[in-house]
Image: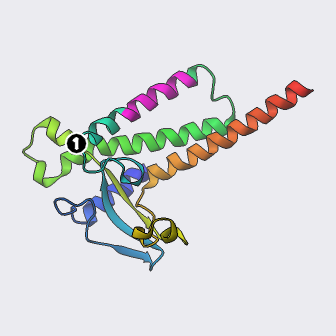
């Protein structure tokens, strides 16, 4: 819910990116040179991979459906059997549903596609990214970034935290299993 509220606020308060661009010209500095609120349309995935391609909106609409299917299968098999992995799955589901909602809805809200066909509007779906932070030394890794990490959103944060939580929950479970086997 927080993800969708922040995304719709961003869409309402920032102009559409100009044709051929993925970012709005408006920037709201929250903490100057550290954290800015922006509006970026991301049809791809992390770091904008796939942005501007004809295949990305469809492929990245299907991947969350596949992920949801796999989560359901693994849940039924009891793979997520500890609190850490269950919290991670909850965060992962929040992130998946947040970004999937964008991909299904946002393309229909673009003014210049109001009279387009259903499929053309669906293919214009994108995820709204708005958090833009400057990281120390990131400009050394990616000089063209100026130190600014690619924009992201609340759903992306949930997915990121879920990945780390699953990793550490898995390590903890493995450690427990080794102790039981050695005992």
Q: Position of residue 63 (x, y in %)?
A: 39, 34
- Residue indicated by mark 1: 54
Query: Outermost residue toward the right?
Result: 183
* Quarter assignment of residue 173: top right
* Towards the viewer: 75 or 123: 123
Query: Outermost residue toward the bottom?
Result: 32
Residue found at x 19% / y 50%: 109
Residue found at x 51% / y 28%: 71
Vertical relation: 80 (above or below) 122: above
Residue found at x 48% / y 38%: 93
Magenta part, dominant SS? helix
* Towards the viewer: 11 or 44: 44
* Towards the viewer: 182 or 106: 182
Give the extent of the magenta segment: 63-74
Specify the quadrant that holds the C terminus. Answer: top right
> In the shown orientation, is residue 164 left or right of residue 180?
left
Vertical relation: 169 (above or below) 113: above
Query: Outermost residue toward the left?
Result: 115
Q: Position of residue 21 (x, y in %)?
A: 23, 61
Vertical relation: 119 (above or below) 110: above
Mark 1 residue crowding within 10 angstroms, few (<14) / some (14–19) / many (20+): few
Vertical relation: 22 (above or below) 82: below
Q: Position of residue 115 (x, y in %)?
A: 6, 45
> In the shown orientation, is residue 28 left or right of residue 80?
left
Helix, strand or loop status at disc 1: loop
* Quarter assignment of residue 167: top right
Is residue 177 magenta-colored? no
Residue found at x 50% / y 65%: 141
> In the shown orientation, is residue 14 left or right of residue 133?
left
């Amino acid at each position: 819910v927080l993800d969708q509220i922040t995304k719709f606020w961003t869409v309402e308060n920032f102009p559409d990116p100009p044709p051929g661009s993925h970012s709005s010209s408006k920037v709201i500095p929250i903490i100057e040179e550290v954290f800015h609120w922006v509006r970026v349309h991301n049809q791809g995935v992390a770091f904008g991979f796939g942005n501007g391609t004809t295949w990305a909106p469809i492929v990245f609409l299907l991947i969350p459906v596949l992920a949801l299917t796999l989560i359901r299968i693994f849940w039924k098999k009891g793979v997520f059997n500890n609190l850490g992995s269950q919290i991670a799955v909850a965060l992962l589901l929040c992130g998946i549903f947040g970004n999937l909602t964008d991909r299904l809805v946002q393309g229909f809200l673009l003014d210049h596609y109001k009279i387009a066909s259903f499929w053309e509007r669906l293919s214009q779906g994108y995820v709204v990214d708005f958090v833009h932070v400057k990281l120390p030394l990131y400009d050394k890794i990616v000089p063209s970034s100026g130190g600014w990490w690619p924009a992201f959103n609340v759903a992306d944060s949930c997915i990121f935290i879920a990945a780390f939580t699953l990793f550490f929950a898995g390590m903890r479970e493995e450690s427990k299993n080794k102790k039981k086997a050695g005992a």
